[in-house]
Image (cartoon, rainbow, N blue to C red):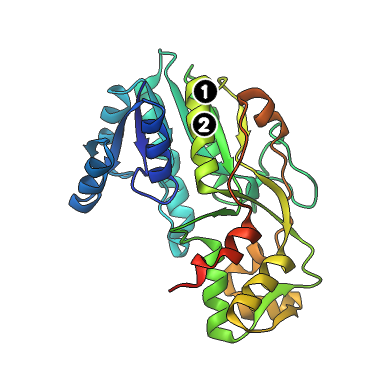
Amino acid sequence: MRVFVTGATGFIGSAVVQDLISADHRVLGLARSDTGAASLSASGAAVHRGSLEDLESLRRGAAAADGVIHTAFIHDFSNFAANCETDRHAIEALGAALAGSDRPLIVTSGTGLLRPGRLATEADLPVSGPGSIPRVASEEAAASVAARGVNVSVVRLPPSVHGNGDHGFVPLLIRLAREKGVSAYVGNGLNRWPAVHRLDAAQLFRLAVEKGTAGTRYHGVAEEGVPFQSIAEVIGRCLNVPAVSKTPEEATDHFAWFAHFAALDNPASSASTKQELGWRPRQPGLIADLEHGHYFES
């Protein structure tokens, strides 16, 4: 297949590109900058210049491919709601180019959209309505293009996609622990985060574009739920700072905008995904990855 990959130079997308190429697919990668274009060329991918905001560039890229994997997202939490709407429009543009064909579109979403406090499955729908997390726009857009006959499926990723080059939530926790001299968790810290290594996630995206079923939701979850206290404790050990409990009120001060995620109880299953696609995560788990030490080298 010739696969158009958005976010092709990102933490997850670059791993997707390499996994696709290793499986003898051809990759057309979206690049905003000369630096990104050079990186893609060096990886063996063809370059398609454009951006998430340039909807015509997305339509052209999708039209030139046998399938699309959409991993790009603007990770600026100060403008989160607007960036979620940008993602909605990007998915709609990609879908418009694929309508009337059976070419697959794989959209990225998150397990954090699902109802907390219980083991979430692929059959669960995201929490919607007033007060819902703005990122629900991605799944709403997937449903919208599916209604127009697009062969679209969704890969939900957990709060922690870990591995070398991670610049997401776990590095943020490490930075906070360094700045404040403590590695914190909320209450008893037994709230659970699902997790997956970026290389395992990349393999799942490839399997989904190769043999996924239209309208299906897949969970990129290797570990169903790592207690947040365990994450805080390993960060504390590696930084030689204490791991401490914070009340919900104290957590708001300590974590700021991240307090919601620090308290999130989001266990999730990938049993259906593994059964349908034969996905078998093989990389180290989150705690083992943290203990390996590369997260603390900078």
Q: Name the residue: 28% across, 30% down.
A: 61
Q: Is residue 268 left or right of residue 69?
A: right
Determine whether the residue tagged by mark 2 lies in a helix, strand or loop: helix
Looking at the picture, does residue 274 appear above or below residue 178?
above
Residue displayed at 42% across by 48% down: 73
Q: Residue 106, which numbered label?
A: none
Query: Is residue 194 shown above or below 281?
Result: below
Residue 275 percent coordinates (x, y): 69, 26
- Is residue 279 at least partly visible in the picture? yes
For the N terminus, give its image quadrant: top left
SS under mark 1: helix
Query: Could you give the CA–CA distance between mark 1 and mark 2, rounded to whole angstroms?
Result: 6 Å
Front-lying residue, 216 or 79: 216
The vertical placement of 295 against 180, above or below, is above
Q: On the image, numbered disc 2 is attached to which residue?
A: 142
Quarter location, residue 62: top left
Residue 4, quarter of picture: top left
Amino acid type, residue under disc 1 in the picture: Ala
Kindly indicate whether the residue at mark 2 contacts the one at mark 1 (C-beta within 8 angstroms): yes
Asked whether the viewer can see residue 92, the reply is no
Q: Residues within 10 Å of mark 2 (few under 14, many from 20)?
A: many
List x then y, in percent, for residue 143. 55, 29
Q: Which residue is at the front of the view, 169 or 97?
A: 169
Please name the residue that numbered disc 1 is placed on: 146
Q: Hey, what amino acid is under mark 2?
A: Ala
